[in-house]
Image (cartoon, rainbow, N blue to C red):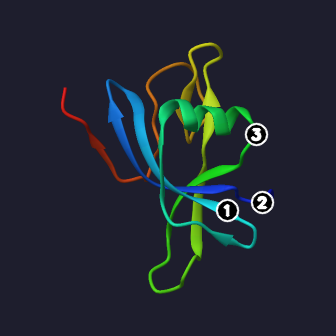
Amino acid sequence: MAKIDGVIEAVRYKGGKIELVRLYERRGPTFSDHVLLDRPALLGRLKDGKNLVTGRRQPLLASTCEGGLPVLLSGGTSDSIVTTPGGHGPDRLEGVPSSSSPP
């Protein structure tokens, strides 16, 4: 299994696309404090080959994170960010707490 480069803990959608994610990035043998990334920054990391997964930080265990499903790019030119491979459509990170921003 490949080393995990980041763990996405929460997501905000707008119009079926990811607007913002909160994640922990690997920094050597440990994970960072949470980082907020907008959609272009997240796409950049995925296109650079970073191994991102869904998950969460374990309470009271410093920078220990538990990973879940891999985060994938799907859909060719109109990239969708998903946890299950498939065709085109809205972004969908299953099992990640989410909110929708106001219109």
Q: Which mark is residue 3?
A: 2
Pointer 3 residue: 49
Q: Going by the picture, which residue comes out furthest to the top?
A: 77
Q: Nearer the viewer, mark 2 or mark 1?
A: 1
Q: Going by the picture, which residue comes out furthest to the bottom?
A: 60
Q: Secondary structure at mark 3?
A: loop
Q: Nearer the viewer, mark 3 or mark 1?
A: 1
Q: Bin the neighbour count of mark 3 within 10 Å (Cα to Cα): few under 14, some 14-19, many 20 and up.
A: few
Above or below, 68 relative to 13: below
Point out residue 98 in the picture as x, y percentages from the top left corner: 33, 47
The picture quadrant where one finds residue 73 is top right
The answer for how far apart the CA atoms under marks 3 and 1 are is 14 Å
Kindly indicate whether the residue at mark 1 contacts the one at mark 2 (C-beta within 8 angstroms): yes
Above or below, 99 relative to 10: above
Q: Amino acid at mark 1?
A: Arg
Image quarter where the N terminus lies is bottom right
Kindly indicate whether the residue at mark 1 contacts the one at mark 3 (C-beta within 8 angstroms): no
Q: Secondary structure at mark 2?
A: loop
Point out residue 100 in the picture as x, y percentages from the top left corner: 26, 38
Query: What's the residue at 46%, 31% (across, down)?
Result: 91
Query: What's the residue at 54%, 30% (across, down)?
Result: 40
Point out residue 19 in the picture as x, y percentages from the top left corner: 39, 34
Q: Which mark is residue 26?
A: 1
Image quarter where the C terminus lies is top left
